[in-house]
Image (spheres, rainbow, N blue to C red):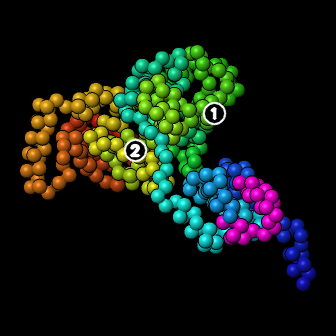
């Protein structure tokens, strides 16, 4: 009995509650607490003392109608309240079937607005035509975002210690990511030139090791670049290029562009998940833009685009003679294969040869590209034309 009384002392009973509060995600703890605080203020203003399914139904109905919350926002809020209410009020709202049914009905027919993506030719044009004394920072951020598939929230965390040069190629390590899985990517020429140019402008004795510093009138300052600045860069690029609806190029544009270019180069979605850029197939599919089939070419990978952009323009807009020749070659190929492959529709088709679980070769008329994935790193070599 004495042991039981000591075991149930007040100090010991306080430990589980403190431990539960620490289960909130460290990066978004303030958001969780803010969402819970708003909900508690709402029930207090309505004179409600007990949390029930009907109370939560009324709360979410008001958010969806009066405040026009979108279905993804409602689900995000539900997830945060599910965690916080369980911790602070010991109520499990996962058991509320009517609430879940309401959220599912709201999601029916909803199509999320996704950021537009840049074509590889547009990226090259911006790099070549935009003046460096004004757009050098944006150019470097775009190179990092597209080459590494980086989120706008990951770019502020890049430090000068995360970048190393090996045989003329920059290797960038990303220790802090949204998925908490470190990854790396490489930057080749001619893009290395822009990064080195920006790095050379770094002021001496900067009190931070963060790589991205504010850039104005051809000079870097000691002020670091924040997430909101990165989020506005795609719109800045689209505006300079004179693209339609530049406001639709949001902070996700560079990452979606990276996914689209890589997907159009040939690798499957499963192989794209190998570098740990995306946690699930659903996340990856959401990042890929549905571009016309004629743009599915191996050279759309951004690292090779500077050498192939002009060729792509000729392929996209063939002359009548070129089109006739292309059709004849397609018919010949189909005949040789005894019509076993109905997918061969044009000369821009490619084939993928898998050598093993880590290596594959992509072939088409323009050339071949060998891709090897090891230790969460993508290595592209043996590019032949």
The region drawn magenta spans: 35-57
Comes first in the chain, label 2 or label 1:
1
Comparing 105 with 253, the one in front is 105
The N terminus sits in image quarter: bottom right
Q: Relative to 232, is 34 on the left or the right? A: right
The dot on residue 35 is none
Q: Residue 341 appears at what percent x and percent y?
A: 17, 54
Identify the residue at horizontal 57%, vertical 43% (top origin): 175
The label nearer to you, 2 versus 1, is: 2
Identify the residue at horizontal 9%, vertical 41% (top origin): 328
Secondary structure under tag 1 reads loop
Mostly what secondary structure, the magenta segment?
Answer: helix
> Does residue 309 appear in the picture of this structure?
yes
Comparing 48 with 7, the one in front is 48
Identify the residue at horizontal 82%, vertical 63% (top origin): 47
Q: Relative to 76, is 124 on the left or the right? A: left
The dot on residue 226 is 1
């Amino acid at each position: 009995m004495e042991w039981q009384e000591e075991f149930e002392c007040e100090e010991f009973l306080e430990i589980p509650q403190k431990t539960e509060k620490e289960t909130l995600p460290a990066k978004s703890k303030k958001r969780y607490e803010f969402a819970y605080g708003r909900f508690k203020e709402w029930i207090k203003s309505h004179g409600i003392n007990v949390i029930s399914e009907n109370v939560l139904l009324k709360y979410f109905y008001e958010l969806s109608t009066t405040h026009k919350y979108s279905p993804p926002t409602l689900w995000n809020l539900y997830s945060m309240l599910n965690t916080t209410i369980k911790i602070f009020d010991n109520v499990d709202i996962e058991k509320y079937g009517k609430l879940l049914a309401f959220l599912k009905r709201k999601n029916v027919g909803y199509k999320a607005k996704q950021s537009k993506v840049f074509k590889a030719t547009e990226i090259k044009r911006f790099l070549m035509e935009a003046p460096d004394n004004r757009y050098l920072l944006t150019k470097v951020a775009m190179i990092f975002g597209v080459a590494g598939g980086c989120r706008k929230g990951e770019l502020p965390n890049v430090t000068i210690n995360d970048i190393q040069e090996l045989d003329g190629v920059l290797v960038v390590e990303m220790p802090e990511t949204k998925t908490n899985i470190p990854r790396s990517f490489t930057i080749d020429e001619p893009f290395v030139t822009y990064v080195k140019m920006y790095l050379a402008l770094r002021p001496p004795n900067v009190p931070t090791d963060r790589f991205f510093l504010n850039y104005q009138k051809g000079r870097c300052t000691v002020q670091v670049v924040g997430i909101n600045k990165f989020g506005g860069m795609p719109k800045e690029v689209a505006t300079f290029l004179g693209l339609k609806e530049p406001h639709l190029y949001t902070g996700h544009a560079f990452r979606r562009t990276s996914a689209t270019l890589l997907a159009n180069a040939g690798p499957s979605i499963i192989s794209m998940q190998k570098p740990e850029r995306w946690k699930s197939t659903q996340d990856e599919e959401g990042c890929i833009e549905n571009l016309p089939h004629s743009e599915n070419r191996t050279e759309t990978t951004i690292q090779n685009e500077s050498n192939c952009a002009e060729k792509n323009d000729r392929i996209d807009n063939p002359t009548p003679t070129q089109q006739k020749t292309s059709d004849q070659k397609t018919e010949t190929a189909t005949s040789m294969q005894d019509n076993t492959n109905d997918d061969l529709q044009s000369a821009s088709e490619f084939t993928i040869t898998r050598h093993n679980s880590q290596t594959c070769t992509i072939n088409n008329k323009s050339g071949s590209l060998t891709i090897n994935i090891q230790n969460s790193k993508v290595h592209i070599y043996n590019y032949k034309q």
